[in-house]
């Protein structure tokens, strides 16, 4: 069974607006959401980047059914995994059975801020694996200690634990990270309809686990307006390679996207209000093996997106699946 969800973009909205967006997503029929966890936005034009754990506490009170996960948190440098373990346990206790922890190796954009450098991917992957070991150790309850390669925990106990521990999903953009996700996580998160990533995840042990795929769209009154909005707020969609992981500041991202044209963004963002294009994008992820597809609406106008999906996408999609 395929489920549709909503991407809560912390980079683009103020804290109270993020909470309202989550409430509206639940109201129109989205079953789950993922919320981004950043210290910085990608570019200054996006304008926001509040502390995700505060937002999650508010969302817990503003919703009753919506399942929500971080999409994604990096527990390797900026925040010690013991603190992530405590934060996630608290949110899971506030919304029983509705929270999951999405983790990844992060981006230099957010992780460099404490001055500890930006390791190569292979090191970050090792750090992520050990961080998950720390998180799960602390979730066992009782007093725990860990003396590892990258992290030390001394006589730590998380007193507030949920009745049901959160699932841990791992973001993977390539086969190597997908193999790690399949081996140690409860689910996969990706931002492209990559069947090879799904295959690597399945082969490593994740065949029965959920696979989350993110689609970026911009719904507006017409396609021209949508393209302009997407280019203004999400020009980084056209970047390739490892730039999204390695560039350190919004300023360097702005320099990197100076030559990005509107048509470049339109190749990577579904622009406009034609339901057929949205259905086709969803189907592409389904065909690649994803069973949870969540949608990111670019720009300040979320309501026009909610209306389109409430009236024309969600009902038709659910009818096709039923």
Image (cartoon, rainbow, N blue to C red):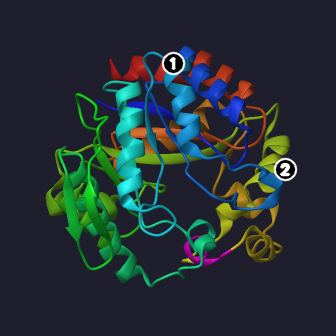
Describe residue 109's horizontal placement relative to residue 194 as left or right. right
Q: Secondary structure at mark 1?
A: loop
Compute the Cα span from label 1 to label 2. 33 Å
Describe residue 234's horizontal placement relative to residue 135 as left or right. right
The quarter of the displayed image where residue 178 is located: bottom left
Residue 87: percent from left, percent from top: 42, 44
Residue pointed to by mark 1: 63
- The verdict on residue 235 being magenta is no
Q: As drawn, which residue projects farthest toward the front?
A: 155
**Mark 2, residues whose alpha carbon is within 10 Å: few (<14), some, or many (≥20)?**
many
Residue 225: percent from left, percent from top: 85, 42
Describe residue 227's horizontal placement relative to residue 115 as left or right. right
The answer, for residue 171, to whether it is visible in the render is no
- Specify the quadrant that holds the N terminus: top left
**Mark 1, residues whose alpha carbon is within 10 Å: few (<14), some, or many (≥20)?**
some
Residue 316: percent from left, percent from top: 49, 19
For the record, the magenta segment spans: 243-248
Determine the residue positioned at 70% across, 44% down: 298
Residue pointed to by mark 2: 228
Q: Is residue 137 above or below residue 125?
A: above
Q: Nearer the viewer, residue 238 or 65?
A: 65
- The verdict on residue 244 being magenta is yes
Determine the residue positioned at 81% across, 59% down: 44
Determine the residue positioned at 45% across, 60% down: 74
């Amino acid at each position: 069974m395929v489920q549709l969800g909503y991407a809560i973009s912390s980079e683009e909205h103020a804290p109270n607006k993020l909470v309202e967006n989550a409430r509206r997503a639940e109201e129109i029929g989205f079953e789950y959401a993922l919320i981004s966890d950043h210290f910085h936005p990608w570019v200054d034009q996006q304008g926001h980047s509040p502390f995700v754990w505060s937002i999650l506490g508010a969302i817990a009170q503003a919703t009753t059914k919506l399942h929500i996960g971080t999409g994604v948190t990096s527990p390797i440098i900026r925040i010690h995994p013991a603190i992530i373990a405590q934060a996630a346990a608290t949110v899971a206790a506030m919304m029983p059975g509705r929270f999951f922890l999405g983790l990844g190796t992060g981006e230099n954009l957010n992780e460099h801020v404490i001055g500890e450098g930006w390791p190569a991917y292979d090191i970050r992957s090792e750090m992520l694996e050990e961080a998950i070991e720390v998180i799960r150790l602390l979730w066992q309850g009782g007093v725990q200690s860990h003396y590892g390669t990258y992290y030390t925990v001394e006589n730590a106990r998380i007193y507030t634990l949920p009745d049901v521990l959160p699932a841990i999903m791992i973001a993977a953009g390539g086969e190597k990270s997908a193999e790690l996700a399949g081996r140690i996580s409860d689910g996969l998160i990706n931002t492209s309809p990559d069947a090879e990533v799904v295959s690597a995840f399945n082969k490593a042990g994740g065949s029965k686990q959920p696979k989350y795929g993110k689609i970026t769209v911009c719904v507006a009154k017409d396609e021209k307006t949508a393209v302009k909005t997407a280019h203004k707020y999400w020009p980084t969609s056209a970047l390739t390679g490892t730039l999204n992981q390695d560039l350190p500041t919004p300023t360097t991202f702005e320099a990197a996207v100076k030559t990005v044209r509107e048509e470049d963004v339109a190749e990577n963002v579904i622009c406009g209000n034609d339901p057929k294009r949205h259905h086709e994008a969803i189907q592409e992820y389904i065909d690649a093996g994803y069973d949870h597809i969540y949608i990111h609406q670019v720009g300040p106008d979320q309501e026009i997106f909610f209306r389109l999906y409430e009236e024309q996408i969600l009902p038709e999609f659910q009818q096709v699946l039923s």
